[in-house]
Amino acid sequence: MQEKIVLYKKVADDVLAMLQQAYRVVQFDGVNAGNRAAFMAQLEDAVGLIGASVKIDATILDLAPRLKAISSISVGIDQFDPADLSKRGIALLNTPDVLTETTADTGFALILATARRVVEMADYVRQGRWTHSIGDDCFGSDVQGKTLGIVGMGRIGGAMARRASLGFGMPVLYSNRHPNPAAEKAYGARFCPLATLLQSADFVCITAPLTPETHGMIGATELAQMRSSAILINISRGSIIDETALISALENGRLRGAGLDVFEREPLSPDSRLLQMPNVVALPHIGSATHETRHGMAVCAAQNLLDALSGKATRNVVNAEVLTQMRQFGIQSSQPSL
Ligand code: 8YV
C-alpha cells in the first residue's frame, strides 16, 4: 500500500502525475468551510502535505501524527510556524526563485499603473468621457528617473531594483536586515535606514516577507514620513502595512496613491474604502499568477515534497534543522526572504 499525500490546491495533471508515481494522492481544490472537515479527516495517515493559501496551524498538525514534510506552493511561509514544525520533526519547503521575475513584473505594473493612472484613464475611455483632447486633469507623473525605495532586498527586491535601475534609470534606495552588496554593485542600490528611505523615495515598494518583525512595519508614523507626492506599492503581504492608517493617509491627501496586490484580509471586501479612491490600484493577489509561473511553482513544490519524503532534499528547505535531525546532509536552507 502506497503512503498518502494530501494535496490542497488544484494543480495541472502533469504535477499530479509526478506525485502519483510514488504516493497515493488525496486532492482538494482549496480548503473552505464546505470541505474543511473532509480535509481534516484525511490527515491522520498522511506523510506529506502540499498546497497553498491555507493556515496550517497546531490544530491541523495535531491531526497529522505521521506527517514528515509540508511543501508550500509559495515562496511566502507566513501560513506556517516553522519553529513548531521543527519541534514536530516536520520539514517545510517553499518555492523561491521560480516566481521572482513574475512578481517583480507585477510590482512594476503597479508602479506604472498608479503613476500614469492607467486604470483610471482606461475607465475614462470606457465610460465615454474621452470627448476632447485631454488636459492636465488626466496627467500622471513620470516613473523614469524617480527614486525607488525597496523595503526588503531579497530576490524579488533585487528583481525590482534591476528593472528600476537598468530599465528606468531610477536611483534605488533599500532597507533590509542586512546590506546586499550584490544589489549595490549591480544596480547602485543604496542601503539606508527605513526612515531615510521613506523620506526620500518617490515610490516605496514592499518586498519584505511577513514575519513577526515586519508585521505592521508601515504604520501611521512611517506613512507620515513619506512624501505627500509618493506612491506606496505592496507586493508582499498586506499585514506589513497598517491598512487603516494607509486609508487615512490616502483620504487625507498625505500620500499620492497606492498600488496594492495584497491586503490584511483577502479577498478584499468590496466595501473597502480603498476601492472608493481613484488613486488606488487594487489587484487580487496576482503577484505570481501567470500560467507559466504558477505551473513552475507547482512543479517545484511537487519535486520539493518528493525529495523531502525520500530524504534527498538539498534545496528550498525552510527548516533545514529537521532534515539534519533526520541525518540528511548538504541541505541548502531557504530563509524567509521573498
Ligand atoms: C501565491 C505568493 O499567490 O508565493 C507566494 O508567497 O504570495 C503567491 O505566489 C500564493 O502563495 C498562492 O499560491
Image: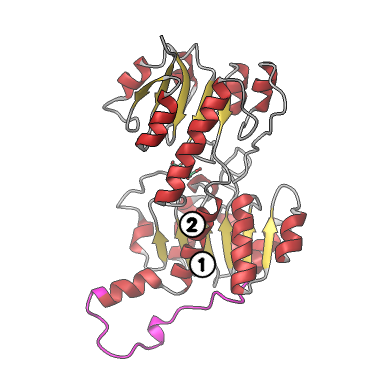
Residue at which label 2 appears:
246
| Numbered circle sitting on residue 174 | none
Q: Is 151 positioned to the left or the right of 66 in the image?
A: right
* Residue 241 visible in rendering: yes
Q: At 62% from the left edge and 50% from the top edge, which residue is drawn?
A: 155
Mark 1 / mark 2, whichever is N-terminal: 2
Badge 1 amino acid: Leu
Badge 2 amino acid: Leu
Q: Is 63 positioned to the left or the right of 230 in the image?
A: left
Q: In which quarter of the image is the N terminus?
A: top left
User: In the figure, residue 201 lies in which quadrant?
Assistant: bottom right
Within 8 Å: ligand 1 and the Cβ of disc 2?
no
SS class of the residue under badge 1?
A: loop
Within 8 Å: ligand 1 and the Cβ of disc 1?
no
* In magenta segment, residue 108: no
* Residue 270 placement (x, y as % from top left): 30, 52
Q: Classify 10 Å Cα crowding around label 2: few (below 14), some (14-19), many (20 and above).
A: many
* Residue 277 placement (x, y as % from top left): 37, 65
Between 93 and 300, the one nearer to me in the picture: 300
* In magenta segment, residue 136: yes
Q: Is residue 101 above or below residue 317?
A: below
> Which range of residues does the magenta coloring cover?
126-147
Q: At 43% from the left edge and 19% from the top edge, which residue is drawn?
A: 23
Between 335 and 60, the one nearer to me in the picture: 335
Q: In this view, does 197 lie above or below 132?
A: above
Q: At 50% from the left edge and 34% from the top edge, which residue is drawn?
A: 301
Q: At 60% from the left edge and 37% from the top edge, which residue is drawn?
A: 212
- State the CA–CA distance, disc 1 to disc 2: 9 Å
Residue at which label 1 appears:
255
